[in-house]
Image (cartoon, rainbow, N blue to C red):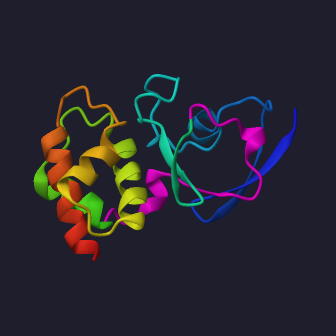
Amino acid sequence: MPTYNLKINGELVTVTADSDTPLLWILRDKLNLVGTKFGCGIAQCGACTVHVDGVATRSCQLQISLIDKEEITTIEGLSKDGNHPLQEAWEEVDVPQCGYCQAGQIMTAASFLKENPNPTTQEIREAMHGNLCRCASYNRIEKAVAKAATKMS
């Protein structure tokens, strides 16, 4: 089995895995970074979203062999103390219900707000539409993203 050197949440790590292993399973099974969730396995729900060089990426479909020098950020690496403006807004707006989609929602929103720090409501809806929430907390998610945007600008 090949060995891969990865930069995850600012730290260099070495893992041994089959070349077709999805990044999701490297994070969860080899590195115990379980904040990134398995949802659908076909990159449709967004629960597995991480940042690859700052871009929101579905980790369930990204094979470990395709990662070279990119920097990976998981929900655990977004903020060491849980004080990222999105995490704070999530609490203030009381977004989570079951919580399963939350890491993917937050990671998608963080990447989006980095590119668009002053979004309209419609832009927030468009950016977040690919992340599914079984509890249908979409209105609260939208409010939290808007609230975080005001904190980040």
Number of marks drawn: 0
Quarter-of-image position of residue 27: top right
Residue 80 is drawn in which quadrant?
bottom left
Say left or right for 1 vs 7.
right
Find residue 38 and report its horizontal and vertical position in percent: 47, 29
Residue at (47, 42) in percent of width and height: 49
Residue 131: x and y, percent? Answer: 35, 36
* Image-based side of 95 in relation to 123, left or right: left
Q: Position of residue 124 (x, y in %)?
A: 26, 52
Tell me what residue is drawn at x 20 percent, y 71 percent: 150
Task: Please report the bounds of the magenta region as a residue range.
Answer: 60-83
Quadrant showing the C terminus: bottom left
Relative height, residue 148 to residue 152 (above, below): above
Q: Is residue 87 above or below residue 44?
A: below
> Is residue 42 or residue 101 the one in the foreground?
42
Q: Is residue 96 magenta?
A: no
What residue lies at 43% left-to-right and 26% top-to-bottom? Answer: 39
Give how far across and how far down residue 51 sits, in percent. 52, 53
User: Is 2 on the left-hand or right-hand side of 31?
Assistant: right
Q: Where is 153 relative to 16, above or below? A: below
The answer to if 71 sits in the magenta stretch is: yes
